[in-house]
Amino acid sequence: MKNEKRLNGRDLINIGIYGAIYFAILFVVAMLGLIPIFLPLLAVLVPILGGIPFMLFLTKVKKPGMLFILGVILGLLMLLTGMGPWPILTGAVAGLLAELCLKSGGYKSAGKAVLAYALFSMWIWGNYLPLFTDYEGYFAQRADYGQAYIDAVQKLMPLWMAPVLLAASFICGLIGGLLGRKILKKHFEKAGLA
Amino acid sequence: MSAPYSSEASQKKRRGFLDPRTKIVIVLLLAVFVLGGLGGSQMRPVKTVLSALPFLLLLIERQWRGFARGLLILAIGYGLLFLMPYLPAGLSYIALMCGGIITRFVVTIVMAEYLLDTTSVSEFISAMSRLHMPQAITIPVSVMFRLFPTIREEWQSIRRAMRMRGIHPGGAKAGQVLEYQMVPMMTSSVRIGEELSASALTRGLGAPVRRTNICRIGFRLQDLFFLAGAAFVLVVWVLELCGVSLW
């Protein structure tokens, strides 16, 4: 019984497969984020689009630990792409919350899966934290992007945007989760993937 | 080339200039200091030297194409910054922004590509197990890095196929484009991933025993040299935080 609860090689590889698809989508959207208008929209677009691979991933998750590991790995990858150490922390916390939510549904409940994805989506907030925790310093570092860029971002990202973005990532996570469910039913179940 | 295949000999020939662990340390330094922009004015000369490292390594490993491409993109970035004052107002802002972004990103991307091109998955896993990284991290990460190029290829060919059917931005509804591009991309990526997983499991990945492999990794003189350099960068940074001025 104890052995069945432990993660085996196949589970870890599944984390890698779906993590790679999720990160590929994140990466494409994040490239848009270099344009100032899209920077706050990252908290909207990534949770919505990422819901499709994530809901498919959740159908493979039957044991505790997988969401937590994915959260930490996404944080590590963000460190490699220059976002600083914050995403590791938010990734771990969001992963843990999603884990608890999914566990309370016995890894079967579809509603709990959508909620778990919404909780997981909040990890993306960590990418904004370097901006909000050190408002002056962040823009001083980006002086070489030009004053026009800085003005545009400052106008879009006043300090009160911090809680708004957190809430946005959760709500869009719900939308993304529902969208993912719909696509799952329409395509992947028929194809025998889910 | 006609010599009989010997895994040991081929491994010897393929052994990289640096140990994977050293490469990862350099990528992290670049990501944090050059890309992440940590550190103030005292770090500037250090950052310049750091930025030159990936190009030096590419030359040492004779990756001419990577070297030329990195240099070209860097030249475009600096070219934009150089042209910027001569352009009309609206255009010059865009040039400044693109130039700033390119010059900031390209060095770290070149280094990351160097790491991926010169490190096999086996080398990566054995380096990580020597660092006592848990398998729960190393297995997913190595699967991800193995899949990224596959996903890119799949996505490109699916986009081409869909364009032929008139499904592209501007030709169909955004929702449709998304659905008809993402669903096949995910389906084929997942299928490839599952085949990969079957093959890796057959070779004992994730088994509860310690795996061995024929990769020869380990620190040599050049690794010590680069690691000492990395330690020096950190020392300079800490000294700057403490307010000691060096130059």
Image (cartoon, coloured by chain):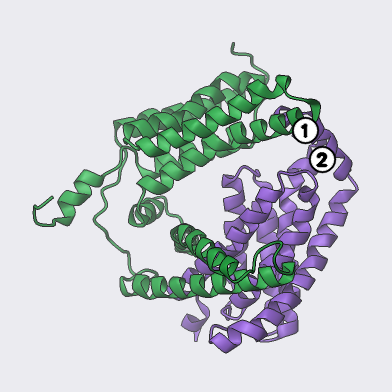
Chain colours: A purple, B green
Mark 1 / mark 2, whichever is N-terminal: 1
Query: What kind of residue is marked 2?
Result: Val
Q: Residue at x 66, y 22 (%)?
A: B83
Q: Is label 2 in a helix, a strand or a loop?
A: helix
Residue toward you, B3 or A61:
B3
Q: Is label 1 in a helix, a strand or a loop?
A: helix
Note whether residue A96 is visible.
no
Question: Which residue is farthest top?
Answer: B247
For disc 2, the chain is: A
For marks 1 and 2, give the one nearer the viewer: 2
Q: Are marks 1 and 2 in contact (CB under 8 Å)?
A: yes
Note whether residue A99 is visible.
yes
Query: What kind of residue is marked 1?
Result: Phe
Q: Residue at x 75, y 35 (%)?
A: A138
According to the image, label 2 marks what residue? A153
- Residue A160 lies left or right of residue B224; in this view the side is right
Vertical side of B171 occupied by A146: above or below: above
According to the image, label 1 marks what residue? A139
Residue B204 % position (x, y): 33, 71
